[in-house]
Image (spheres, helix red, strand yellow):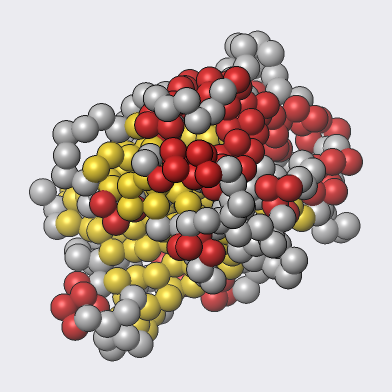
Amino acid sequence: MELNHTHDASVKSWLASANEPGTDFPIQNLPFGVFRRKGSDEAFRGGVAIGDQIVDLAAVAATPVLEGLPQLAAQACAGTTLNDFLAMGSVAWRALRHALFDALRHGAKSDLVGALHGCMLPQAEAEHAVPTRIANYTDFYTSIHHARNVGRVMRPDDPLTPNFQWLPIAYHGRASSVVVSGTPFHRPMGQAMPPGATAPVYGPCARLDYELELGFYVGPGNAMGEPIPLEQAEDHIFGMCLLNDWSARDHQFWEMAPLGPFLGKNFCTSVSPWIVTMEALAPYRVPFAHPADEPQPLAYLDTAANRAQGGVDVQLEVLLDTATHRARGVAPDRLSATSFRHQYWTLAQMVTQHTVGGCNLQSGDLLGTGTISGPTAPEAGAIVELSRGGTVAIDLPGTGEQRRFLEDGDSVILRGWCEKPGAARIGFGRCQGEILPVK
Ligand code: MN
């Protein structure tokens, strides 16, 4: 993943809001999503975020502003989902990104500027949908700190399962209940075994939790029976989003022995509307390594390139906005913050592991990284870790409230961004969801 002129931090856009310090969407980002005018019955179509605007790619495709491969790529974004565009692969993704960059930069040709001006909608006037038709959703479990923290709650004597350090663990999740940021959901009903009880109870989830994750979307898929080698894995990844794997811990911990999560996870998963491309993330790649005294990856999960820059340094934070925060007009409280660079396995290793037995990934599939918890206790990516299984109350300084798990009316906001000296700061926007009472 080499740097090119679209990563040049000195380039500004003719769109003033794209040059504001702290914006998530400078010209170096250009994330993709689908949108329509808020409250309308228009068809959703692909768009790219720039500053406080969206470039409508269906409108761009209908003008003569692009030609060749960039035009074909824009046409592939004109439908209600981005699947066709993702299936085109990295040459087409790059061609469209570079064409948009050249048209949006300060000093672009005046006919390009004029044409794009007519293809913009303010983000404040837009609503979103899940950006792809997700046929398959898989959630990994690749933070060793999360695995140890949760393991201590579930299995105090033996928190880390013996397979964790040898392969990226995952379960096959539920694609039908993946929703876009801003979609509320009802507290789930289910079965749980309370501590000390001899028979399970059926009722509303009493231990509702969030999970701070990143998601990543599959570009070109692979044929069944043809695994994706690690050397080629990143060719199959389009980009990343924020992902909240809402979890009913009481239901999950009772049901998931000996199989994986079921009702504890399948009621809702939230994703941010924008997909930040792997090309935009190129300046933020970091080395990957397991500690020298821990198992090293088997050969099929190990390449020099993966060791050199398999990681991604995405800064992340979780905010809690309770009904009381909103009623009092108080800013949300930050629950935790960490970085994805601490993860025990890389995106490429997850793709390769997923397919090594012959499983076929499909364009638009969603893969989750698993909860992202950093090495120190305040960096935990789920409330079950912060509250140590609900035994410690978490203070919310903004309102004076406390939480051990989530309550009705709570809204959880995930945010992510990348920044470092010499590179443009780019952001993921946000992934928000509110818990409604049980139905
Ligand atoms: Mn998860």
Image x and y of residue 20, in percent: 51, 68
Residue 246 can be seen, yes or no? no
Q: Nearer the viewer, residue 85 or 201?
A: 85
Estimate the x, y position of residue 153 in percent, counting from the top left. 49, 63
- Going 45% across and 48% down the picture, which residue do you hit? 49
The quadrant in which the N terminus is found is top right
Q: How many marks?
A: 0
Res 405 visible: yes
Residue 373 is left or right of residue 15, and the answer is right
Q: Residue at x 72, y 55 (%)?
A: 8
Q: Nearer the viewer, residue 388 or 285?
A: 285
User: In the current view of this chain or complex, which residue is farthest to the left?
Assistant: 439
- Residue 76 horizontal side relative to residue 178, left or right: right
Q: Is residue 419 above or below residue 114?
A: below
* In this picture, residue 284 sits left or right of residue 317: right
Seen at 62% across and 12% down, the residue is: 223
Query: In which quadrant of the rendered view does residue 287 lie?
Result: bottom right
- Coordinates of residue 330 in the picture (x, y in percent): 27, 82
| 330 and 41: which is toward the camera | 41
The x, y position of residue 351, in whole percent, is 65, 32
Which residue is depicted at the point 75% across and 27% down? Answer: 232
Residue 209 position (above or below residue 67):
below
Q: Tell whether 215 sits left or right of 298.
A: left
The foreground one among 148 and 308 is 308
